Image (spheres, rainbow, N blue to C red):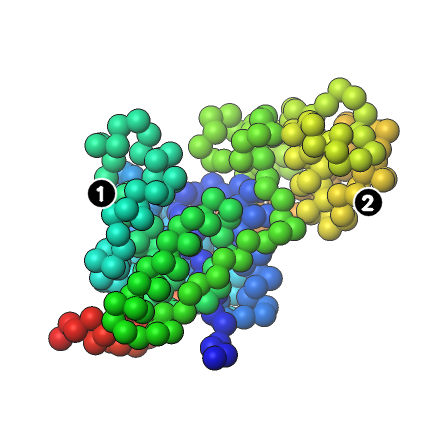
Amino acid sequence: MSKKKLVFSGVQPTGNLHLGNYLGALKNFVSLQKEMDCIYCVVDLHAITVFQKPNDLRENVFETLASFIATGLNPDRSIIFNQSAVSGHAELAWILNCTSRIGWLNRMTQFKDKAGSDKEKASVGLYIYPNLMAADILLYKATHVPVGADQKQHLELSRDIAQKFNSDFNCKDFFPLPEPLISKNVARVMSLRDGKKKMSKSEESDYSRINLKDSADDIDKKIKKAKSDSEPIPDNLKNLEKKPEALNLINIYSEISKISLDKVLNEMSGKDYSFLKKNLTELLVKEITPVGKEIKKLLNDKSHLEQILKKGKEKANIIAEENLKNIREKVGLI
Ligand code: TRP
């Protein structure tokens, strides 16, 4: 059975995307777009599982879209849209709420982290969030899903849901079981202040991250202030791994320069971190500031962005409606 490959991924409209999003997701999306059919979705329905101020949400959807385009996603090539514009996501999510099991959701570690100590006060949406994610993927019968390691459990749940649906309704292979694409070479980008934490927009200090919209000056200051190590750069990975902040800087350098970690260590061992930082700053300024400028430019023309969303929504809707027709029939809905 050689079905056509189809990539689907979703990004939450958080606004203010950073180097972690860029190296961990966006650049990977751009390279996948060259090899396969891809659908990239700004998942606004996922965002509202925790309260969002309406104006901020709207702005963040535009900003996430602008970051997609500025990084090189091509709306003529890939389908790019916002989730709530295609109502099939919500409809299929309801059907899958009835396929998914409470026991399965109870095992989701992200809910436990996000809901915190007072689970009674979390929204019901936050609890069933993984079912909506399954709906996003299965609505298009996507076969490959690029996600960060933190989403692996959700993707496994999507596979379980697909499998149970196929078996409940006696339609083997109806939903393909989506495969995660967890890119091996993309190192996790960590906070510049704490090498054990992921770079995140929710960390309080802006010095912990490089934002895509940072100026050359911001980048320079942040890298100068970034934690590293007082000893010179070691000549092997084993010693480097003991210093997570230093490892993180070298990882970022290796990712952007496309020079392997071993080679970077070969070239830089014995030198001070200030040497690495100077080179890293140059690379980051060259790579990131044009993206930031493009994001700002795109955000100045909302009607152009709206046009992109409209086109994406129309293309997505055609696939979604066709699949939903068959799904409704399988379930017995008239
Ligand atoms: N849950 C994902 C995240 O927080 C976003 C997401 C929603 C997603 N739907 C998806 C990712 C479908 C991949 C496929 O990162």
Which part of the image, by quadrant, shows the C terminus?
A: bottom left
Where is residue 115? Give x, y as percent: 31, 34
Q: Residues within 10 Å of mark 1 (few under 14, many from 20)?
A: few
Where is residue 293? Give x, y as percent: 57, 47
Q: Residue at x 65, y 51 (%)?
A: 185
Where is residue 248? Give x, y as percent: 66, 35
Q: Residue at x 39, y 60 (%)?
A: 159
Disc 1 within 8 angstroms of ligand 1 (CB): no
Disc 2 within 8 angstroms of ligand 1 (CB): no
Query: In the figure, residue 178 lies in which quadrant?
Result: bottom left
Q: Amino acid at mark 1?
A: Val
Decide if residue 14 is on the left or right side of residue 286: left
Decide if residue 70 is on the left or right side of residue 41: right
Q: How many marks?
A: 2
Decide if residue 183 is in sight here: yes
Query: What element does badge 2 sit on?
Result: helix
Q: Which residue is mark 2?
A: 263
Q: Residue at x 72, y 37 (%)?
A: 250
The front one of 44 and 179 is: 179
The front one of 219 and 272 is: 272
C-alpha distance separating marks 2 and 1 = 49 Å
Q: Amino acid at mark 2?
A: Lys
Q: Is residue 298 above or below residue 19?
A: below
Where is residue 330? Give x, y as percent: 23, 74
Query: What element does badge 1 sit on?
Result: helix
Q: Is residue 299 above or below residue 35?
A: above
Residue 124 circle label:
1
Q: Is residue 75 above or below residue 13?
A: below
Q: Residue furthest left?
A: 334
